[in-house]
Image (tube, rainbow, N blue to C red):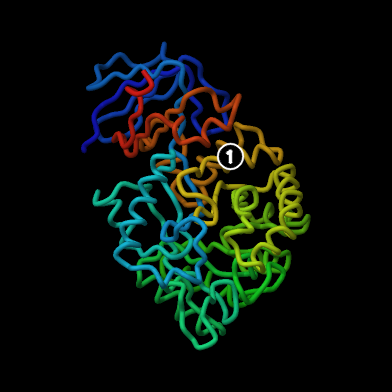
Amino acid sequence: MTAESLHLRAARLVDGTGRPPVEDACVRVDRQGVITYAGPAGRAPAEPADRTVDLGDRTMLPGFIDAHVHLGSAHGTPPSTQGLADPVLRTFDTAARLARTLDAGVTTARDLGGLPAGYRVAVETGRVRGPRLHTAVRILSHTGGHADFRQPDGTDLSGGIGELVDTVDEVRLAVRRLLRDGADLIKVCASGGMGSPYDDPDDEGLTVEEMAAVVDEVGRHGGKPVAAHAQGRAGILNAIRGGVTSIEHGYGLDDEGCDLAGERGIFVVPTLSTVYLGIDRDRMPDYHYQKKVRWSGLTKENIARAIERGVPIAMGTDAAVGPHGRNLMELTYLVDLGMSPANAIVAGTRSAAELLGVADRVGTLEPGKLADLVVCDGDPLRDIGVLGEPGNVVWVLQNGVETKNLLERCA
């Protein structure tokens, strides 16, 4: 499907910049899928459009960006069982998760382990419906670390999600392999984790020197972001000192971590869905459940402090730990910990675009940007929860092309 010129009118526009909403708003899109106007309807250009859509008492927003997903894994499926799945069925199941994520209002996503680069190309070439993708392909971890799911006999049941490195030289070689395999960014394990069988969040992962080598190596090959799985305090501080681009999870983020992240402009991606939705005793190994319970309250306290202190935050859900296709519930959890609805929307649009390095193209509804646009029932500035229910996301544009339309059902 090709883009058509559009004249869209709705009760309000929340453009993702953080500016106040525009009432009785209009967005115009040209045939190249680029926004030419976004603002009050009364000031919109009078040029004809191929299609005019009156969206009624609804809200137009930018397409959302989920900065932390695992689309190659089913919800609630431990990484240690990924290798048992039929690869053909995994491919079809992954394609379904891509479509479900797009329908939830996520037009761009950053996959942080387990998704081959071919899926990015499949979306780009229209083979499957899904968010525009950035993928880390695999995760760098030391032996016995967060991404090591090998059995005592050496069998890897994770489907190859981890790339094990134990020296600086091994780190450099692994980064080169990942870049060869099409990685858009590199993910490192700076700490242990909740779901890993051999370590804990307070355990340290890659050393400062090893993470600095990752940063140096990507810099020698044109530059790529480096995302750090970092849950405990020590791993967070090591990752920041190693020069990473983002702290993923950040459960043990203290005042020193907030200070350093703020000083260096490092984003925190809190993945609060793992705390609010990701605790299920019946589906979890006991070690995983016990760690989740132990860290739940501390996580909320620390992320609330980071929000209060203005640490740069981008939205990410860790979808797979939480459900795919309900990504925008993450905004509700940010608001629950003290963020305003307007700032939560910014975290899922402009800030996430800045983290991914695509803010010149997407993340806000402004002239010159691609028309990634979401229309929802109601007013999310009054009730942020409306975005968390995919049925309330009634229309989605990606590059100016309609990918979801429930308007007739809602008429």
> For this rendering, which residue is in front, 285 or 117?
285
Q: Left of 53 or right of it: where is 287?
A: right
212 relative to 167, above or below: above
- Farthest-out residue, bottom: 153
Q: Quadrant of the N terminus?
A: top left
32 relative to 261, above or below: above
Q: Quadrant of the C terminus?
A: top left
Residue bearing mark 1: 331
Question: Would residue 201 be visible to someone looking at this image?
Answer: yes
> For this rendering, which residue is in front, 238 or 275?
275
- Farthest-out residue, top: 42
The location of residue 373, given as percent across then percent down, is: 40, 33
Q: Amino acid at mark 1?
A: Leu
Question: Image point 51% across, 80% down: which residue?
Answer: 150
Snapshot quadrant of residue 325: top left
The location of residue 273, given as percent across then percent down, is: 59, 49
> For this rendering, which residue is in front, 88 or 3?
88
Question: Image point 50% across, 44% down: which residue?
Answer: 327
Crowdedness of circle 1 by 10 Å Cα count: few (<14), some, many (20+)?
Answer: many
Question: Image point 57% across, 32% down: which residue?
Answer: 385
Question: Would residue 267 be visible to someone looking at this image?
Answer: no
The location of residue 274, given as percent across then percent down, is: 60, 53
Q: Secondary structure at mark 1?
A: helix
335 relative to 84, above or below: above
Question: Image point 26% across, 26% down: which residue?
Answer: 5
The location of residue 290, given as percent across then percent down, is: 70, 64
- Farthest-out residue, front: 282
